[in-house]
């Protein structure tokens, strides 16, 4: 839809709205293709991203051979490739593994709450990626490319399916209250897609989820409406001259969305009407899990109000002591216990809450990390593990996914993905498929290339589908 076509609707909104709402501009010039390529299994997505590299051999990928060969040198794998180039000896998991639920899925005691919902999970034990550096590997998991500047998965979903609400963004990002991910806002960029599809990051450190959402104290509504009316007139003239500049169109849409969000966001972010039982379910009664628990609960509330894609980051910037992510170089026990204490109950609570509300039937929950960790120590005599791109674990739950299933496998010590390897491109293709989108047809012409989330790779992993 061109800018000229949206001007009459903007005029209607201005005439009908009155006050500040009168400057609400037409909300979606690029409301996306709004077409599924086939019948979707899922309507919406929550993507939980555990930043820093969660260790697969200490969480979801039980390796008895690591127990048998604990303390021995790794052999038979060819050149040992580690990020810091200091491979030590094999290290058995310091966490106890048990089978859970009717499915018998193996989960370590690091994640007891998630283990309790094992029958909801479709665990992919054969993930691999092509980079072992945090920022490019995070970009790859988010956008399909190791460089910044490419649209994130949430942006592609917004572009492909549009929004289910006029009052909230289609794609919302909830960073960890402790800090933003490596690469910052580039992780939820719209790249070369129309700017309207960029993720909207809510503040998770302050009481106000969106900065400057409320008008300043003492603001004169009449003067504000007059000023915004002038801005509207200037923007309309600009739109008529621009011939369809997407950045300008997105700015116009953002004004209307901002007007609607002034009413909708405070209501969505207000958790005071949630029951004490629900708050405990998400871990809001514990200091260690309260911050991420609030994000998980807010994610559910946003989905209920029509948000299409919510991305939750667990973990923040790198470095520091203790680390605020899963980057367990120094001591896998200390690091992973600390991170699990804030993630385990909220994620399990989210799955339980979605299931009991009937929302898991049309919601896809995706849990990823950028890579795994080595089955051996980082250096001799340490208890930490290095970055590991050759095998790691992700899982899915909800709409269209096989419940209580383990797919693929790594080798006997978790070094290589050997059975049914799954790349990030394959995972992205499968997510789009569950949403009714063909990853080879969801494209955008840019710089002479029909770009897509999966680049020129990827296939739908049929073994993950119910």
Image (cartoon, helix red, strand yellow):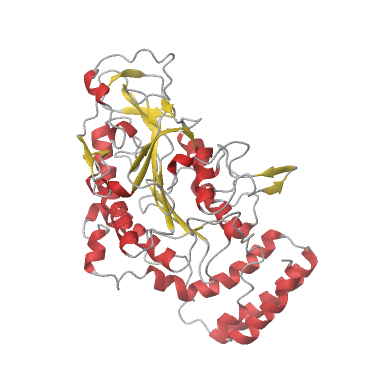
Q: Residue at x 40, y 42 (%)?
A: 51
Q: Position of residue 95 (x, y in %)?
A: 21, 34
Q: Position of residue 46 (x, y in %)?
A: 43, 54
Q: Is 244 on the left-hand or right-hand side of 210?
A: right
Q: Residue at x 75, y 62 (%)?
A: 244
Task: Answer yes or no: is residue 52 visible.
Answer: no
* Above/below status of 140 relative to 214: above
* Above/below status of 122 relative to 356: above
Numbered disc total: 0
Q: Position of residue 85 (x, y in %)?
A: 41, 19
Task: Answer yes or no: is residue 130 visible.
Answer: yes
Camera-side residue of 286 and 111: 111
Q: Quadrant of residue 127?
A: top left
* Above/below status of 40 relative to 70: below
* Above/below status of 462 relative to 209: above
Q: Position of residue 210 (x, y in %)?
A: 46, 65
Q: Residue at x 35, y 13 (%)?
A: 75
Camera-side residue of 108 and 279: 108
Q: Is 261 on the left-hand or right-hand side of 150?
A: left
Q: Quadrant of the N terminus?
A: bottom right
Q: Quadrant of residue 163?
A: bottom right
Camera-side residue of 298 and 356: 356
Q: Quadrant of residue 328?
A: top left
């Amino acid at each position: 839809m061109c800018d000229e076509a949206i001007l009459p609707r903007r005029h209607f909104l201005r005439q009908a709205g009155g006050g500040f709402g009168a400057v609400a501009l037409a909300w979606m010039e690029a409301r996306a293709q709004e077409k599924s390529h086939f019948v979707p299994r899922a309507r919406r997505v929550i993507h939980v991203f555990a930043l820093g590299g969660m260790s697969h051999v200490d969480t979801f990928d039980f390796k008895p051979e690591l127990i048998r060969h604990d303390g021995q040198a790794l052999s038979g794998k060819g050149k040992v490739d580690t990020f810091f180039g200091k491979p030590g000896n094999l290290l058995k998991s310091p966490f106890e593994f048990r089978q859970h639920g009717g499915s018998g899925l193996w989960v370590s005691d690091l994640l007891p709450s998630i283990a309790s919902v094992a029958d909801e999970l479709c665990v992919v034990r054969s993930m691999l990626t092509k980079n072992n550096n945090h920022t490019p590997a995070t970009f790859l998991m988010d956008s399909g490319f190791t460089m910044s500047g490419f649209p994130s998965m949430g942006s592609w979903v917004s572009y492909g399916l549009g929004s289910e609400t006029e009052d909230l963004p289609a794609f919302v990002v909830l960073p960890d209250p402790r800090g933003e991910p490596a690469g910052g806002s580039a992780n939820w960029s719209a790249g070369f897609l129309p700017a309207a599809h960029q993720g909207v990051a809510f503040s998770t450190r302050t009481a106000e989820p969106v900065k400057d959402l409320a008008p300043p104290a003492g603001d004169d509504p009449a003067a504000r409406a007059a000023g915004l009316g002038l801005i509207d007139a200037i923007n309309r003239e600009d739109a008529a001259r621009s011939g369809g500049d997407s950045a300008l169109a997105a700015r116009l849409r953002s004004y209307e969305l901002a007007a609607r969000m002034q009413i909708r966001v405070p209501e969505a972010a207000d958790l005071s009407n949630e029951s004490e039982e629900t708050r405990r379910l998400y871990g809001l009664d514990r200091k260690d899990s309260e911050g991420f628990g609030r994000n998980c609960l807010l994610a559910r509330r946003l989905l209920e109000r029509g948000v299409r894609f919510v991305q939750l980051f667990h973990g923040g910037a790198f470095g520091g002591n203790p680390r605020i992510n899963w980057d367990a170089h120094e001591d896998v026990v200390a690091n992973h216990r600390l991170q699990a204490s804030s993630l385990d109950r909220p994620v399990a609570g989210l799955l339980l809450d979605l299931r009991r509300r009937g929302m898991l039937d049309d919601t896809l929950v995706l849990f990823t990390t950028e890579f795994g960790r080595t089955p051996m120590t980082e250096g001799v005599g340490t208890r930490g593990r290095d970055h590991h791109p050759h095998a790691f674990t992700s899982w899915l739950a909800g709409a269209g996914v096989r419940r209580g299933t383990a797919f693929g496998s790594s080798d006997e010590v978790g070094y290589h993905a050997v059975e049914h390897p799954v790349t990030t491109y394959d995972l992205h293709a499968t997510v789009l498929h569950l949403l009714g989108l063909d990853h080879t047809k969801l494209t955008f012409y840019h710089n002479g290339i029909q770009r897509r989330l999966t680049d020129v790779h990827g296939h739908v992993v049929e073994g993950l589908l119910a």
